[in-house]
Image (spheres, grey):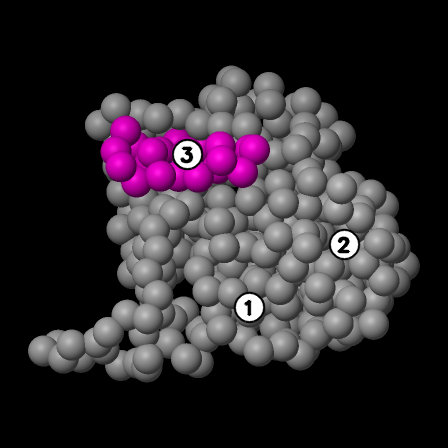
């Protein structure tokens, strides 16, 4: 089982013809959907690859919380350890993309009550094969909860996956370095690696991150693919050029493929290929959450670019 800790939010996704959106204008939305978002993207993408996934976190006893929990459960994800807190308010992200495919975000942080890693979450983490956590924090107690969870997973011998993301500039992001030291695998964009290390060159930044203690550092480079560094190997995995409709959740889809590959001890080249195929499958689709790619859509990308899908993913029943 893979545990996903925190960042259980709802996404309100829209596609518009173009930015800017100006006061007084009427801008027609071409796409509109409300569903799970944030770390739920990784959970759903992982479940669609065939992983057993459990989500650990808190939502409010409100319509957005119900949408998150019901959406996850409909994908076969274990939601037993999601706390639905009376009086809490589920965080919501407004995700707006135009034809350039890069999103803008409107964030409602909500109100959460849990201040520390719950005992039942710790138990689930200690029995899991791996833990994924991201670096977004809208509440001051979140960093400590994430660090405690990563530490519990490491102590139990589980794999730990950390994606710092852009982080919330309203909070001190120094805790991302502490999380990186607890990670088996770090996934970061070039900008995020630069922020963590102070180094602009992605290779040097990756080497510095590797010195923090992880076994694998993955630098996500969009359409260019990704750079992968382990203690004994450096690999550039080229991306797959596809039509990009919406880049939102592409990194989350890639992360799910990385988790899947690590659990199966795939060689680095196979891991990078599958990760890039998952990202490429996502950017061809609008939306987040239940619009992350299916295993068959990832297989289609692999097949289109001359890879044998059965080498990466089981044949559909």
Cα distance between the residues tagged 2 and 1 = 25 Å
Numbered mark located on residue 283 in the image: 1
Residue linked to disc 3: 70
Q: Is residue 73 magenta?
A: yes
Which is more toward the observer, 141 or 211? 141
Q: Is residue 103 left or right of residue 56?
A: left
Cα distance between the residues tagged 1 and 3 = 24 Å
Secondary structure at badge 2 equals strand
Quarter-of-image position of residue 1: top right
- Percent x, y of residue 61: 28, 29
Q: Is residue 103 left or right of residue 174?
A: left
Secondary structure at badge 1 equals helix
- Percent x, y of residue 169: 38, 60
Seen in the picture, residue 167 relative to 175 is either above or below; the reply is below
Seen in the picture, residue 281 relative to 172 is either above or below; the reply is below
Which of label 2 and label 3 is nearer to you?
3
Residue linked to disc 2: 216
Q: Residue at x 41, y 34 (%)?
A: 70
Seen in the picture, residue 71 relative to 16 is either above or below; the reply is above
Q: Is residue 125 magenta?
A: no
Whether residues under marks 2 and 3 lie with C-beta atoms below 8 angstroms apart, the answer is no
Magenta range: 57-77
**Nearest to N terminus: mark 2 or mark 3:** 3
Q: Residues within 10 Å of mark 3 (few under 14, many from 20)?
A: some
């Amino acid at each position: 089982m893979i545990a996903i800790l925190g960042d259980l939010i709802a996404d309100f996704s829209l596609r518009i013809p173009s930015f800017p959106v100006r006061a007084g204008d009427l801008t027609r939305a071409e796409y509109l959907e409300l569903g799970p978002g944030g770390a739920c993207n990784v959970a759903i993408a992982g479940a669609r690859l065939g992983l057993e996934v459990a989500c650990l976190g808190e939502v409010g006893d409100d319509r957005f919380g119900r949408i998150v929990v019901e959406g996850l459960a409909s994908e076969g994800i274990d939601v037993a350890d999601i706390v639905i807190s009376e009086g809490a308010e589920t965080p919501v992200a407004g995700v707006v993309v135009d034809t350039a495919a890069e999103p803008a975000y409107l964030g409602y942080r909500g109100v959460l009550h849990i201040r520390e890693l719950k005992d039942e979450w710790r138990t689930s983490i200690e029995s899991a094969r791996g833990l994924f956590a991201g670096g977004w924090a809208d509440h001051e107690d979140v960093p400590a909860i994430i660090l405690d969870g990563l530490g519990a997973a490491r102590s139990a011998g589980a794999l730990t996956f950390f994606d710092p993301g852009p982080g919330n500039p309203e909070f001190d992001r120094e805790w991302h370095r502490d999380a990186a030291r607890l990670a088996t695998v770090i996934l970061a964009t070039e900008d995020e690696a630069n922020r963590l290390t102070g180094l602009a060159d992605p290779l040097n930044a990756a080497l510095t991150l590797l010195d923090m203690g992880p076994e694998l550092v993955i630098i996500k480079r969009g359409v260019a693919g990704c750079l992968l560094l382990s203690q004994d190997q450096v690999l550039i995995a080229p991306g797959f050029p596809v039509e990009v409709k919406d880049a939102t959740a592409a990194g989350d889809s890639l992360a799910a493929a990385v988790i899947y590959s690590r659990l199966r001890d795939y060689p680095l080249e196979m891991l990078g290929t599958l990760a890039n195929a998952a990202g490429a499958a996502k950017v061809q689709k609008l939306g987040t959450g239940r619009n992350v790619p299916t295993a068959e859509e990832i297989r289609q990308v692999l097949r289109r670019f001359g890879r044998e899908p059965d080498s990466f993913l089981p044949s559909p029943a």
